[in-house]
Amino acid sequence: MTKAITVSGLHKSFGKTHALDGLDLDVETGEVHGFLGPNGAGKSTTIRVLLGLLHADSGAAQVLGRDPWTDAVEVHRRIAYVPGDVTLWRNLSGGEVIDLYGRLRGGLDKRRRTELIERFELDPTKKGRTYSKGNRQKVALVAAFASDVDLLILDEPTSGLDPLMEEVFQRCVEEERERGRTVLLSSHILSEVEELCDRVSIIRKGRTVESGSLADLRHLTRTSVTAELAGPPNGLSRLPGVYDLDIQDRRVRLQVDTDKLNDVLKSLSESGVRSLTSTPPTLEELFLRHYQDEIGDEVAAR
Amino acid sequence: MTAAAFAVRAGGSRQLAGTGTLLRFALRRDRAMIPIWVGVNALMVLSMPNTLKSLYGTAAERADLLQQMETNASLRAMLGPVFDDSFGALTAWRIGVYAGLLAAVMSLLIVVRHTRDEEESGRQEMISSAMVGRRAPLTAALLAAAVANAVLALLIAGGLAGQGASGALALGLGIAGVGMVFATMAAIVAQFTESARLARGLTAAVLGAAFVLRAAGDSATDDGSSLLTWVSPLGWLENLRPFANERWWVLLLFAAAAVVQGAAAYELAGRRDVGMSFLPSRPGPADGRLGTAGALAWRLQRGSVLGWSIGFLLAGIVYGAMTEGAADLVGDNEQAREIFQRMGGESAFTDTFLASMLGILGLVAALYIVASVLRLHGEETSGRAEPVLAGAVGRLRWACGHLLIAFGGTVLIMLLAGLGLAAGYGKEFWPILGACLIQLPAIWVIGGLAVLLYGVSPQLAVAAWGVAGAVLLIGWIGPALDVPQAVLDVSPFGHLPKLPGGEMEWGAVSVLTGIAVVLVAGGLAGLRRRDVTSS
């Protein structure tokens, strides 16, 4: 199966700023791929290169098997894009804009359009200038989900939506996956990414720092363990990969590199375990590790 | 109602808090716009006495002019009546109404920019959430307009003092008075519309109506005494009679109108919520028919194409109708004839006059083409182009939709101008129509330059306005100042054959068309290659 998006070694500078510094990205056909990174990491720049709006300085990018710069129109026929900040024409109604975008892509499924407008509780007769931020977002989302395309590129699409609409959005993305469509989802809402995405790529300063399924990524980080023991703990501090060890009488709290978890459990069970909780790392922890410079460098130094 | 309750309804306490800060902020934001508007307006007025001296140097020539103006109703409609033969009075006659018109446009732009524009964009919400009184934004906007008009009045009063101090003061105050009447008018209109564009358009329409009323009144009487003239603020300016026994009490009309309109604006503003308006926008269709980038471009530009079409048709009719009269008036004056000949070529004077009017319409059409081409720029920088280009639309197809309207629109408006001229003049239908179309290659060169600038770099795109302005200046004022041919040759309009009446020059016309094609092609090639800017 061909990949929906392949990007390797992408570079792009704006004057002295290196927005992209050798970025890699692979999105399999049919998956929902999370695209994470702090503000200014280069997510939107990458997306704009994938849309053929920016010309990369060097590196290769392919979208649906084609070059997004030279074959822009052919690629765009099969893509729906939702920007993070939707601007509408002030004197066109939402319904007109939805239909326009549909026709500018591969076409629009009328029945799905009606259904989506109902689910998102959107009034399509209002003029562009009277919509709130969330409602402008809905116009772009309805147009994208109702369009007859193979790939959806969503750049922080839920930034203005309320929790109920956020729920509708997640349902819609799941439906897209069931229909075999590919979704590239750039987002800051980690629960949304954890809920929806098959795989994620985390980028920082224009480079990909982590890529893989959430299970893969969890493997690389630490699990936190809390245990109540029958006897005094013994030798935990000498085990490799154990951090933040906190022993209070027979209560033990610690963090452990997930691939070293087995040794810790062995050591604990030697003392006799009364109760045990083990929490896998949240995406948030994963994320923070890459977001915060110092922490990132510290981990690298160890 | 108790005083406290009244204060609550009218906007609570400390309604003007923050006005000073907002005013300084407004002037800072307009630090380029206001000096340019004021400077150009003042220069136009202050250069007039010298121009007039070269035109009507002798007392006999001036007496002749006064007599002509008495008998020529169509010219009075354009310029107003003459009240005295001093150069001060002639300056007020020749330029006063137009300077007032410019001051009014400047004022309405300033006021709408700092009121409805701010509310529409949502910026007002953040401003108003700070320690800013409810009446402060409108007050700051009106004060900014007042500052601009006051500076303009001072420059004119000071610069023309040599022609008579009291006349200069009256003219300066009158022009500023027109400005303030339309500043407060814009303040009222801005309460009614939801969009700033509509507020500007409606206020400009009122201004247009004021001009038409004055023109109608002046064509009916030769001393500005018609009721129609007295209804129009532009008519007040002429009835102030600067340099001709000033009627100072007319200034009270300006003051009264500004105060009443200002009070009405405050009253209306106090009765509505921030961002809301008295004329809410109507709902649109739930389903759209737009299906292509070209259709979208037409939908976005059709209103302005319609407006320009009507304007050019009317202007053509007016110019056409005054052709015979103008020939009578200018025909006897050697210098004036020379100026027109520099603009329109040497031949029968009616042809010369028609050719110069056509040339002016062509210059104004260059403004249309720049505005229309730069729609591309507006769509791109506002971020609206991005999702369209992310659809199955090539950049060239997207751009060509707008360019078709820009370049095709000039054909339409010049044809309509020709129809108007021919209808107003009543003869020479085909020569006039042909002469109108001959302007197109020069207009297209300006349009092509705008496409090139935009295509190569969107940051450069606004420089196209500078080019159009320079060409306008050369074509409009150049002939009167007798500038060297080398300067006139910079403008593509300088190379056009002087039609009707002159010789057709296919060579120059084809070269200009060729240049326009190359410029557009270069711009499109640049657009294909460069990055789309993000909002």
Image: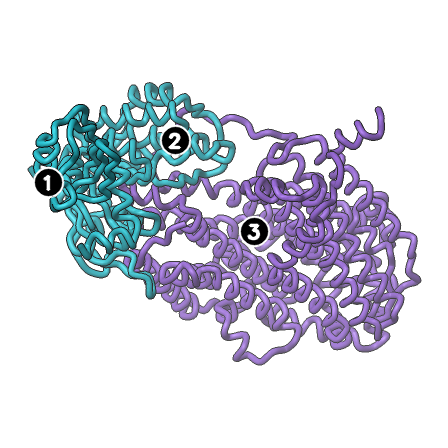
Chain colours: A cyan, B purple
Foreground tag (2 vs 1): 1
* Callout 1 and callout 3 share a chain: no
Q: Which residue is mark 1?
A: A259
Q: Are marks 2 and 1 in contact (CB under 8 Å)?
A: no
Disc on res. A139: 2
Amino acid type, label 1: Asp
Chain of the residue under the numbered disc 3 shown in the image = B
Residue at horizontal 41 percent and vertical 63 percent from the top:
B453
What numbered label is drawn on residue A70? none
Nearer the camera: disc 3 or disc 2: 2
How far from the left and from the top, in percent, is residue B105? 67, 52
Q: Which residue is mark 3?
A: B417
The one nearer the camera, B370 or A71, is A71
Chain identifier of the residue bearing label 2 in the image = A
Amino acid type indicated by mark 2:
Val
Q: Confirm whether circles 2 and 1 share one chain.
A: yes
Location of the C terminus of chain A (image quadrant): bottom left
Q: Residues within 10 Å of mark 2 (few under 14, many from 20)?
A: many
Of helix, strand and loop, which one carries label 1? helix
Residue B192 to residue B326: above or below: above
* Residue B472, image quadrant: bottom right
Give the vertical position of B496 relative to A252 (above or below).
Answer: below
x, y percent for residue B451: 40, 59
Q: Is residue B523 left or right of residue B24?
A: left
Could you tell me which chain the residue with mark 1 belongs to? A
Comparing labels 1 and 3, the label whose residue is closer to the camera: 1
Q: Residue at x 21, y 36 (%)?
A: A224
Give the Cα distance between marks 2 and 1: 46 Å
